[in-house]
Image: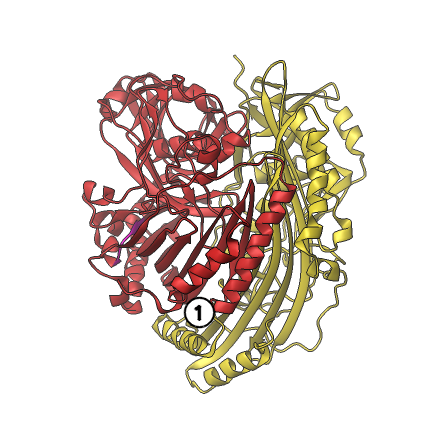
Chain colours: A red, B yellow
Amino acid sequence: MEVNEDLKIFDEKLIDKFNSLSHNKIDYWDIRAGISTGNSIEFTDKKSKEISSYEVIKCGIRTFFNGGWGFVVVEDLSRNSLINKFQKAIKLAQLSESLCNYKFKIKASDVVIKNFELKNKVPLENVDITEKINLVKEHEKIANNFSPNIKNTLTLYYDGIGNNLFLNSYGSRIYQKLSLLRVFSSVYAQKNGIIQRGVNSIGGIGGFEITKTNKAKEISFLSAKEAINLLEAKSPIGGTFTLIMDPKLTGTFIHEAFGHACEADLVLNKESILEGKIGEKLANEDITIMDDPRFGKGPKFGLPYELYGSYFIDDEGIPAQKTIIIENGVFKNYLHNRETASRMNLDPNGHGRASSNINKPQVRMGITILEPNDWKVEEMIEDTKNGVLCEDFQYGYTDPTTGNFQFKARLSYKIENGVKKELMRDVSLSGMTLEVLNNIDAIGNEINFSDGMCGKGGQSVRVCDGGPYIRVKKILVGGLR
Amino acid sequence: MSEEINVYNIAQKILNSLNQNNNIKCSEVFLDKKNYINIEIEENSIKNSKLATEMGISVRTIDTRGSLGFSFTNKIENKTIERIVKTAIKMMKSGTPDPDFKKLPDLCNSYPTVKGLYDDKIENLEIEDSSKYVNDLIKVCEKDDKAISQSAKFKSSCNETYIFNSNGIEVFGKDTICSISSNIIVKDKISNKTSFGFDWQSVRNIKDLDSERIALNALERAKQHLIRKNVKNMKVPIILTPIGTINVILSPIISAINAENFQYKRSFLVGKRGTKIGTDLLDIEDNALIEGAMGSSSFDDEGTPCNNKKIIEKGLFLQQGLLHNSYTAAKEGIECTGNAIRASYSSLPSIDATNFIFKSGNDSKDDIINDIKQGILFEYSGDSANISTGDFSGLILQGNLIEKGEIKHSLNNTMFGINLLELFQNISQVSKEYQIYGPYRAPYVRVDNVQIIGNKD
């Protein structure tokens, strides 16, 4: 595997220099450096708004000493600049240590020396910008031709190829080359003064083949169809209902409301409702939730590429692995990075992730999934007297200290006496995370997932979440009527 | 700027080479540099210290058909820059015609002067000296027996911006920002319930930074939400705190008057210009020229001079009450309002407010609360309005019941819902007290007849 020219500066001699500079001064260091290139294309109403190209270098040096971290961003990857910044980073760890109240050590972990490269069916390097633009144009055409009531369309395409190097003081040396791609379609429809929006996207780790799947081809059609359908939708009536969530919303619930509370940095900072809950029964015994960002899942779902939340190693050099969070209703594990695992005297489980090389890794999810069971969605509907069926979500948020969450569903249907009825828009769902988890009384038999970017502490990372249709006995629905 | 880099030479070289190309109508070079210090507190203890310099350059070029190409890098050296200039042209060639593109901003000979945006003490701040601001935050929690944790951030940065375009614009700006944020967790030892409160402050001059006050505010808010109870469904007045006013009124209005959202008919205010959309108390301006304010600047991120403009005057949404960048202004055939904003060199100019100000009223905040028989004090939702419909329904993450003029318990799992056009017409009181958060200045606002959806049987 050919190492990128800009990254060849990190040779044995330089690494030796880092080791001698840090010897007896700090406990640990790591360096992430990479160069990425890519394109973004934005069309609106069939016209190009932005066609862009980039080439950026990002490098961060992180140091640790006895409970304090230091971090220095480097843009000039020359030997002198790197040595100078490395010395600064040592001083910063010492400064943090001198001011911090909690002292602790980082547990040593296995050394990883490996190159990772994902071979793509259609490498992005081989695809000309005009082909990418044609793809965007096609989506714009589909959305615009759907109905005369479509008033505004937006299609965003972006891709990137990253060459990244990870080094640490234990001797790990990891070089990886990955490419990713995402297409996003947003469509506004308008009729009689009512404006509604449909949004769909597709993303994955791989090459241009990502855009060739049926799932990718239909995003603009689906956005247009949703926007048009929503024109006729009614505002919801507030109250308490039985709720059936589709796989996307199930994913949102286990990620936003529940998953973040499993992140051990938030647990240590008292911002989690799951502190002290390991070993407790939190849900009925049919419920199993895990986070497994390892590669190989795309093909399992019949896709020619890898899921958007996948990674080989996390941003602290720990290999991606499967972590059981809830097994048969019992809470088993938090998600960890090096620091939280060391402090709880456990092994890290590969969830230290950063939005880029110039940000510190936080504890983050990767691919979070609720395991399927045996209900068909039709059976769930038939079995429901007074409920709502919600599909897809717009956004959600959670109070970390109480677990009170709210999601806004995109498409919602009333259910009356076992029959799916009228479409409603902007349905807000809210509840207390642990109550809702405990109130899941039916789990579907087919799993699906969605991909997106998850934000925390000002950083966003690519993630996937999903599961089957699930039913919750009761939930509060907010509405304007 | 590193000694070896001469920004003016680089920019002139790029513009000259683009000038040779007959297909190009106009082009722009944008360069920015940020130097910053970050200190992070977790578990009420200093955890992380960070130093960074980020610098990058972008090239925007538009051809005679109106097609735009854009390219950027942070490798400031000749070969890479030559490459990104070439790709910008390639990107431009592959785009579609856009007759709505008229021009980039024209050369301007006089820019307004705005004082107080730069503080040399921030530019020269050493990370070792920043720790005292952070220690003030930590002490507040240490002294309180209910506080169990705090996460907080201190950030200081010095930013330089350079804009050059083919119409002759050549501007340079340098400003400083220092900000702190605090998020405190409290626990009631008897009930074992926990709750959080937050506050933040951004300033241009470090002497205005008041860490202790920010942590005390966060602590007080956290305590105000320790006892949570469900309430019944009801239609009552709500009092928006300044943070609530930003959340429910100011921030949605900024999106709704964004000329791009307007032109694509994605705003609930389309068709409402020149009409009265609220009571006389709804009075809003966007003012970039306030001395020392966070949103102030003498030019926007395309080099257009900034100014002060009325948006909504005594409830009347003004004909000229939109925020424009050069593209949307030219499309409408009017002068640009100076609201082009870029997050950094890596993004094209979008549109945002500068300092967004809700005019204060005559009533005191305490009188407004005392007047309420039954109502809700609304601090924060976490939600935002649907800009295309104006519908706003969300969970009240931080809010309290008001009974007989007294602030009572916090709300458990309680939602509210209203359309903003209805909300604007229901504004009945505005306080004389106000608070400044970043680019916002907001008072307490009373809104009548808001639907509250509780969960109490």
- On the image, the x and y values in percent for residue A391 come to 34, 34
Question: Left or right of A140: which side holds B309?
Answer: right
Vertical comparison of A345 with B110: above or below:
above
Query: Please, which chain is the residue tagged with disc 1 on?
Result: B
Q: Is the magenta stretch mostly helix, strand or loop?
A: strand
Identify the residue at horizontal 71%, vertical 26% (top origin). B144
Label 1 neighbour load within 10 Å: few <14, some 14-19, many 20+: many
Q: In which quarter of the image is residue A154?
A: bottom left
Front-most of A10 and B360? Answer: A10
- On the image, the x and y values in percent for residue A292 come to 31, 37
Front-most of A42 and A169? Answer: A169
The segment highlighted magenta reads A203-207
Vertical comparison of A265 with A178: above or below:
above
Q: In this orientation, does residue B243 appear?
A: yes
Question: Left or right of A92: which side holds A385?
Answer: left
Name the residue beneath numbered marker 1. B70
Identify the residue at horizontal 57%, vertical 36% (top origin). A103
Q: Which amino acid does label 1 sit on?
A: Phe
Vertical comparison of B190 with B353: above or below:
above
Element assignment for label 1: strand
Q: In this orientation, does residue B241 appear?
A: no
